[in-house]
Image (tube, rainbow, N blue to C red):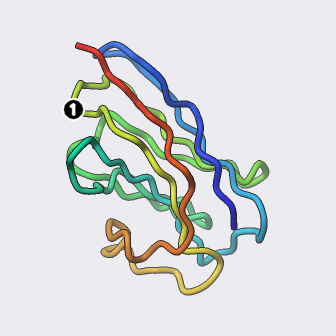
Amino acid sequence: VQLQASGGGLVQAGGSLRLSCAASGRTFSRHTVVGWFRQAAEKEREFVAAVAWSGGFTSYADSVKGRFTISRDNAKNTVYLQMTDVKPEDTAVYHCATNGAWSRPVLSSWSLPTQYKYWGQGTLVTVSS
């Protein structure tokens, strides 16, 4: 599976941005979960949100709940992260990742990077105050 993240850029605080994660290679299955993580300079990687490919169940970090929305377009093999009311602390490199087509992780573990086998390159989001 190859993942291509895009959509990052410079946005003012309070603004909106939509990130995309396009997948190619092996197709997803009902076991697939796709997540977004972010890493700010000199900080640990942080879970942002995740969505189940089948059923659309979602999970969010508390820091983005109510502001970010994760969604997927099965026909386009693409997952989106709609970011609204962004804050300077949202500044980071955003990565999308997936466990692949096998062994869907339990919901409680979706925030753990170790549950994801395939990672895309990051896209930088910079929020100015």
Which residue is nearer to you in this view: 33 or 95?
Answer: 95
Q: Which residue is mark 1?
A: 89
**Which residue is painted at 48% across and 24% down in the image?**
9
For the residue marked with disc 1, what is the amino acid?
A: Glu
Circle 1 — which element? Answer: helix
Question: Dot 1 surroundings within 10 Å: few (below 14), some, or many (20 or more)?
Answer: few
Residue at point 45%, 80% (across, down): 105
Residue closest to the far front: 42
Q: How many marks?
A: 1
Residue extending farthest bottom: 103
Above-or-below relation of 111 to 71: below
Answer left or right for 125 relative to 61: right
Using the image, determine if residue 83 lies above or below residue 55. Answer: above
Q: Position of residue 126 (x, y in %)?
A: 36, 25
Residue situated in front as seen by the camera: 104 or 124: 124
Residue 72 at what x, y percent from top left? Answer: 61, 50
Task: Place residue 127 in its image quadrant.
Answer: top left
Which of 86/39 is in front?
A: 39
Instruction: In the rendered view, tell whether residue 25 sits above or below residue 99.
Output: above
Name the residue: 23% across, 56% down: 44
Residue 12: percent from the left, percent from the top? 34, 13
Above or below, 56 against 33 in this view is above
Residue plotted at (22% across, 13% down): 129
Report the quarter where the N terminus lies.
Answer: bottom right
Residue 120 shown left or right of residue 15 in the figure: right
Q: Indicate left or right for 42 with 32 as reference.
A: left
> Measured from the top left, where is residue 35 in percent x and y?
47, 58
